[in-house]
């Protein structure tokens, strides 16, 4: 990948990618999340890939491996576009029939459709399924559009457009003003206004400031942060970069627990890809803005979900909370102004909306 040195080059790459993807007549979307992975989704992915190659369809059919779709009990899951055709509980042995019947002939494999237990009937499309029909998947809506490990997919879907817009046209204080007007608040318990947090960090003295994405997620059975990092890590990076622009930070950390190996892997790949394209590092897209991100892995301590304990952990110390008489936006990581932000803030990390 060549470094992008301007906003025009980013737009040009996006148009090239969209033209390239438009040449595919069909797209097979396979869930690669941990739930489906436990149900042998990787074997299904490999079988579909071999079958497409054997039938010489790789130039016509796009195979997209995505993050979690949420309906883990029915995995491995597959969506075929166009048509939003939904197959579930797929096995590697189904690959030939899926490709030969559905992709080539346009015929539905009835036995792979989801059976609604209430209606006792098979449903053909994802949007018909009650589990999905009643959801408003705001943050995760992009998961099924992008390969988790492809910055090109994210860019083609509109990724880094918001960053480019902000760097060109929106001053840091205007970004903060917009966040304040949105009414966005933290959802870690305190409900602290995000705009106020950013404003205080922006006004704090000193040239060295940090942005930390708190994806520790210590609550038992909570997997929101993991789902975003596994399925669309560039969404997180872009949100962090916009926040860093707003508060004048040059360094960021994604704090994610070591027990989430897929999330760690995909986030690391995303950081490396963004650096290679020049979307992290010095003078991003030819602008005066410089920002880089490192990954800090937590050891699974519940207490490190608390911002000051998390910062102590990043510094290599025991993860213990400290008194809050001085806010972290003034005295945070390494005693520098720091914005700690949870993924569950939502819209901050949804620049494609």
Image (tube, rainbow, N blue to C red):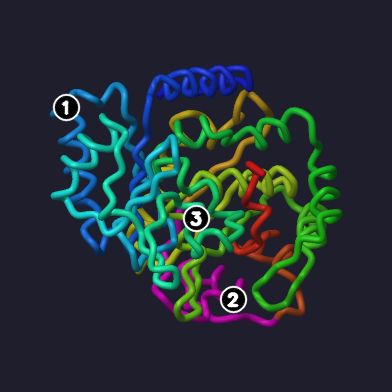
Q: Is residue 14 above or below residue 148?
A: above
Residue at label 3?
128
Query: Which residue is nearer to you in this view: 80 or 341?
Result: 80
Residue at 34% x, 49% y: name it: 78
Question: Is label 2 or label 1 in front?
Answer: 1
Q: Which mark is residue 306?
A: 2
At mark 1, the secondary structure is loop
Q: Is residue 298 magenta?
A: yes
The Cα–Cα distance between marks 3 and 1, rounded to whole angstroms, is 31 Å
Q: Position of residue 13 (x, y in %)?
A: 51, 20
Q: Position of residue 312 (x, y in %)?
A: 54, 71
Q: Is residue 85 above or below residue 62?
A: below
Quarter holding the N terminus is top left
If you read the primary sequence from the N terminus, does the residue marked by circle 3 or circle 2 appear first? Answer: 3
Question: Is label 3 or label 2 in front?
Answer: 3
Which residue range is magenta in the image?
A: 295-323
Total marks placed: 3
The Cα–Cα distance between marks 3 and 2, rounded to whole angstroms, is 40 Å
The crowd level at tag 3 (other Cα within 10 Å; few <14, some 14-19, many 20+) is some
Q: Is residue 21 magenta?
A: no
Q: Is residue 307 left or right of residue 154?
A: right
State the image quarter where residue 45 is shown: top left
Quarter holding the C terminus is top right
Q: Is residue 40 left or right of residue 175?
A: left
Residue at 41% x, 75% y: name it: 300
Residue at label 1?
55
Q: Position of residue 76 (x, y in %)?
A: 29, 57
């Amino acid at each position: 990948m060549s470094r992008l040195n301007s906003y025009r080059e980013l737009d040009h790459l996006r148009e090239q990618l969209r033209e390239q993807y438009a040449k595919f007549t069909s797209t097979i979307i396979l869930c690669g999340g941990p739930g489906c992975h436990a149900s042998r989704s990787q074997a299904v992915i490999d079988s579909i890939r071999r079958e497409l190659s054997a039938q010489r369809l790789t130039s016509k059919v796009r195979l997209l491996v995505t993050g979690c779709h949420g309906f883990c009990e029915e995995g491995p899951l597959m969506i075929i576009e166009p048509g939003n055709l939904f197959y579930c509980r797929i096995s590697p042995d189904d690959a030939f029939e899926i490709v030969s019947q559905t992709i080539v002939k346009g015929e539905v494999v009835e036995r792979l459709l989801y059976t609604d237990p209430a209606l006792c009937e098979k449903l053909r499309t994802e949007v018909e399924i009650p589990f999905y029909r009643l959801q408003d998947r705001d943050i995760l809506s992009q998961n099924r559009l992008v390969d988790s490990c492809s910055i090109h997919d994210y860019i083609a879907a509109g990724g880094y457009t918001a960053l480019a817009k902000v760097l060109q046209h929106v001053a840091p204080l205007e970004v903060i003003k917009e966040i304040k007007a949105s009414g966005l608040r933290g959802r870690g318990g305190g409900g602290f206004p995000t705009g106020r947090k950013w404003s205080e960090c922006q006004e704090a003295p000193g040239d060295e400031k940090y942005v930390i994405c708190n994806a520790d997620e210590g609550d038992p059975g909570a997997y929101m942060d993991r789902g975003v990092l596994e399925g669309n890590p560039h969404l997180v990076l872009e949100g962090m970069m916009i926040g860093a622009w707003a508060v004048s930070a040059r360094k960021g950390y994604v704090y994610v627990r070591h027990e989430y190996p897929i999330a760690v892997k995909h986030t690391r790949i995303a950081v490396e890809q963004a650096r290679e394209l020049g979307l992290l590092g010095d003078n991003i897209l030819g602008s005066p803005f410089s920002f880089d991100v490192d990954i800090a892995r937590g050891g699974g301590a519940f207490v490190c979900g608390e911002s000051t304990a998390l910062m102590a952990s990043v510094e290599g110390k025991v993860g213990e909370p400290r008194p809050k008489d001085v806010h972290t936006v003034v005295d945070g990581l390494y005693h520098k102004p720091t914005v700690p932000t949870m993924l569950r803030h939502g819209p901050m990390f949804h620049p494609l909306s």
